[in-house]
Structure formats: structure tokens, C-alpha cells
Amino acid sequence: MSADTTAGDRHFAADGNIYEADGTVVGTYQLDEHGHLESTSTDEDGDGRVDTVVADTDHNGTFETGVVDTNADGYGETILVDTDNDGDFDSAAIDTDADGTYETVRTDPDGFA
């Protein structure tokens, strides 16, 4: 395994996988045509389902989307989106009781602090 970048005890290897220090694959990443990080997805609990995803959807160097499966049920309970591409997340949805419906939805055009 040849690591290109190290983030704490994790390694982003040339094969597109994210490895823990012990060699366990915990996720994947993709680069854009310029070699910049475009998206990552991880399976934090090792159950075979994606737990976190962040993506640079407009290829400008900042992440516009983030999804987190907080209770490992295979569905994202927390979603953040930069809808106006200014570098700040300005829309959010949270499923507080994990029933598949977002109880809290907020938008702030100035971004969340």
C-alpha cells in the first residue's frame, strides 16, 4: 500500500481507498482531473454501508454536500448542503428520530456559523 496523504491515522492510498493505520479499508475517495479531492465516503462502523459522504460537486475546492448516517441504519440522518456555492453550508436537514422523515430543516443564505 502506497500512501499519498496521511490524515491522522488514516491513509489516502493511490488505489482510491482510505485505510486505517492497521490496514483496514474504511472508505474511498475520488480526485478530480486536477488531482484535487472531489469526494470521500467512509464506513465508520464496518457494517458494509456508507456512514459519511462529503463531495465537492462543482469542483471549486470546497465541499458542497455532507451526509452522515448517525445511527448506522443505512440512511443519512444529517444532511448539509451549500446551495449557493459560496463555501458555507446554508441548508440542513436532520432526522432526529430516524424514521426517514427530516424533522428539522433549516436554510440560512448567509451560511451556518
Image: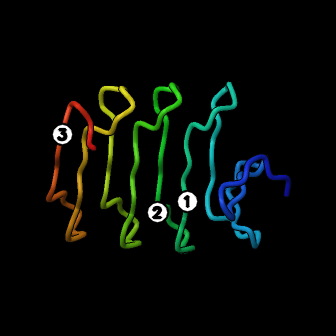
> Is the residue marked by circle 1 packed among few (<14), some (14-19), or many (20+) residues within 10 Å?
many
Q: CA distance from mark 2 to mark 3?
A: 23 Å
Where is residue 90 drawn, in percent x and y? Answer: 26, 37
Label whose residue precedes the other's in the sequence (3 or 1): 1
Name the residue carrying label 2.
51
How far across and how far down the image is residue 101, in percent? 18, 60
Residue 42 circle label: 1
Report the residue marked by disc 3: 107
Please state if 4 lies on the left or on the right of 50 as rendered: right
Q: Secondary structure at mark 3?
A: strand
Classify the position of the C terminus by image quarter. Answer: top left
**Most extreme residue toward the right, as rendered?**
2
Q: Earlier in the sequence, mark 2 or mark 1?
A: 1
Residue positioned 66% across, 60% down in the render: 8
Q: Is residue 101 placed above or below 45 in the rendered structure?
A: above
Mark 1 secondary-structure assignment = strand
